[in-house]
Image: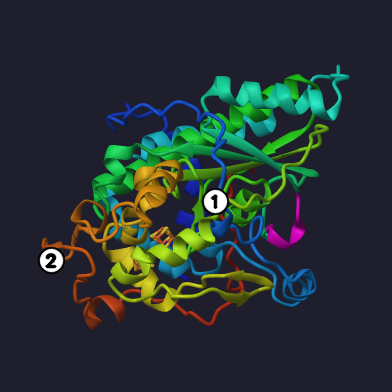
């Protein structure tokens, strides 16, 4: 790796720190209000299992033998290519992202009060949920910290409880996927998520507990914690589907030693909804989404074909067609259940409103089930240096430092 590249990686957080002083001209829309509790009863014929089916012995074995690592550390060359191709949505959102990173770093340095709250775990959990709502997080969930899903190169302190913070993305912008405009809504979600997770960490510290917020892109497999804390289930598109907004939300984590009551995985019937829907499978431009789930690292899930997906994500404004065409993302689970009850069908399936999209690489509109031809110049772009077999960061490469 060249000296220039090494220096850029080394000073990336310092660059972000400076960028936060630039005026914010992003025009980001306001964050939607916090979600009401999801109380809809799930029909019996949609129920499968709370969260995901797991084989704990296999999960332990694979985590021991092949620990997970943060993507950008394992593939530094690919991440530079992704950033270079992401200028259209990164340039105008950098300032906001930089402010989020700054809040994370400030909250990390903030000292816990010496007067620890005597509240019980149940009381602390209620207090924390109220504060999260006041801060404007869409919802939080609480799970035990699980080292199997934390990256060994994490620079955030690992405390026993994980607070999973969700921030909903703007609906209008998200329906413009795939485009730079839509991708900005994800960046806004990350910046707001970092800022609000940092605020929640500072709140815990004022109550006398330790708390460590994590930056974007994170120090752990965030969707694992989303499932473990009952916020959603995994969709066939490989993303965390929340009943309120599907995957139209960003997930930020913080760990804490505050006494808290853990949430549990929930069965929202989403596995069966996916089996009846499969819109993402049909509409993925490169056929990267399997029809069925299979065991992977001890969890039964849909394992996307990264070799086909990643070049498209990098070069087609983040792609995310699998998010755009998802009815849970667009309409929410409640509307889907109502429609299914009345018609026996999944809301929006076969409609251009849901399954149609404009493809940024050729400017054409594709309707339900139509997919653009993605050529070799994208799938095998020689500038995208990406060793798919690499499982660990190459020598000399450290993670993006958010905290230090
Ligand atoms: S991001 Fe695009 S290429 Fe990747 S799985 Fe989703 S639809 Fe397919
Ligand atoms: S598009 Fe359909 S199949 Fe894919 S994740 Fe969403 S609900 Fe599941």
Earlier in the chain: of badge 2 and badge 1, it is 1
- The x, y position of residue 85, in whole percent, is 29, 60
Q: Position of residue 400 (x, y in %)?
A: 55, 53
- Labels 2, 1: front one: 1
Real-space Cα distance between discs 2 and 1?
Answer: 42 Å
**Magenta span includes 105:** no
Seen in the picture, residue 287 relative to 241 is either above or below; the reply is below
In terms of depth relative to the viewer, which is nearer, 393 or 60? 60
Coordinates of residue 67 in the picture (x, y in percent): 70, 70
Q: Which residues are magenta?
A: 145-150
Nearest the eye: 233 or 396: 233
Say left or right for 314 vs 104. left
Work out whether residue 345 can be spotted: yes
Residue most toward the top?
Answer: 115
**At 57% across and 24% down in the image, what residue appears?**
133
Q: Secondary structure at mark 2?
A: loop
Say which residue label 2 marks.
362
- Assign the C terminus to one quadrant of the image: top right
Position in image of residue 20 (x %, y %): 42, 32
Q: Which disc is residue 371 wearing?
A: none
Looking at the rendering, the quadrant in which ligand 1 lies is bottom left
- Residue for badge 1: 43
Q: Is residue 7 above or below residue 138?
A: below
Residue sitting at x 54%, y 45%: 251
Badge 1 residue CB within 8 Å of ligand 2: no
Q: Secondary structure at mark 1?
A: loop
Left or right: 269 in relation to 152: left
Look at the picture and state if 288 lies above or below 352. below
Ligand 1 within 8 angstroms of badge 2 C-beta: no
Q: Residue at x 31, y 57 (%)?
A: 325
**Which residue is located at x 49 percent, y 58 percent?**
239
């Amino acid at each position: 790796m060249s000296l220039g590249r090494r220096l850029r990686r080394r000073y990336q957080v310092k660059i972000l720190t400076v960028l936060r002083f630039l005026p914010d001209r992003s025009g980001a829309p306001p964050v939607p209000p916090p979600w009401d509790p999801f109380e809809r009863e799930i029909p019996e014929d949609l129920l499968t299992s709370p969260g995901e089916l797991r084989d704990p012995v296999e999960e332990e074995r694979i985590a021991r033998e092949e620990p997970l690592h943060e993507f950008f550390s394992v593939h530094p060359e690919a991440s530079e290519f992704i950033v270079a191709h992401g200028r259209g949505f990164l340039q105008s959102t950098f300032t906001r992202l930089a402010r989020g990173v700054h809040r994370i770093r400030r909250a990390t340095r903030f000292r816990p009060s010496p007067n620890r709250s005597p509240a019980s775990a149940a009381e602390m959990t209620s207090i924390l949920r109220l504060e999260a709502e006041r801060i404007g997080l869409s919802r939080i969930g609480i799970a035990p910290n699980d080292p199997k899903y934390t990256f060994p190169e994490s620079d955030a302190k690992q405390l026993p409880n994980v607070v999973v913070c969700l921030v909903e993305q703007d609906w209008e912008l998200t329906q413009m996927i795939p485009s730079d405009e839509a991708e900005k809504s994800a960046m806004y979600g990350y910046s707001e998520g970092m800022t609000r997770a940092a605020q929640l960490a500072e709140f815990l510290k004022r109550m006398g507990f330790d708390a460590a917020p994590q930056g974007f892109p994170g120090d752990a497999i965030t969707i694992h914690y989303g499932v473990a804390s009952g916020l959603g289930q995994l969709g066939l598109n490989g993303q965390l589907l929340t009943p309120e907004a599907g995957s139209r939300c960003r997930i930020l984590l913080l760990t804490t030693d505050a006494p808290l009551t853990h949430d549990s995985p929930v069965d929202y019937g989403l596995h069966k909804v996916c089996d009846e829907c499969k819109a993402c499978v049909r509409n993925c431009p490169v056929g990267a989404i399997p029809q069925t789930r299979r065991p992977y690292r001890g969890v039964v899930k849909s394992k996307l074909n990264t070799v086909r997906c990643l070049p498209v994500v990098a070069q087609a404004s983040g792609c995310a067609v699998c998010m755009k065409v998802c009815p849970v993302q667009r309409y929410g689970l409640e509307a889907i259940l109502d429609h299914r009850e009345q018609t026996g069908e999944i809301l929006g399936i076969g409609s251009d409103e849901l399954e149609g999209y404009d493809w940024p690489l050729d400017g054409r509109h594709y309707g339900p089930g139509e997919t653009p031809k993605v050529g070799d110049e994208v799938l095998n772009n020689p500038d995208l240096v990406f060793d798919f077999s690499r499982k660990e960061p190459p020598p000399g490469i450290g993670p993006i430092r958010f905290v230090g």
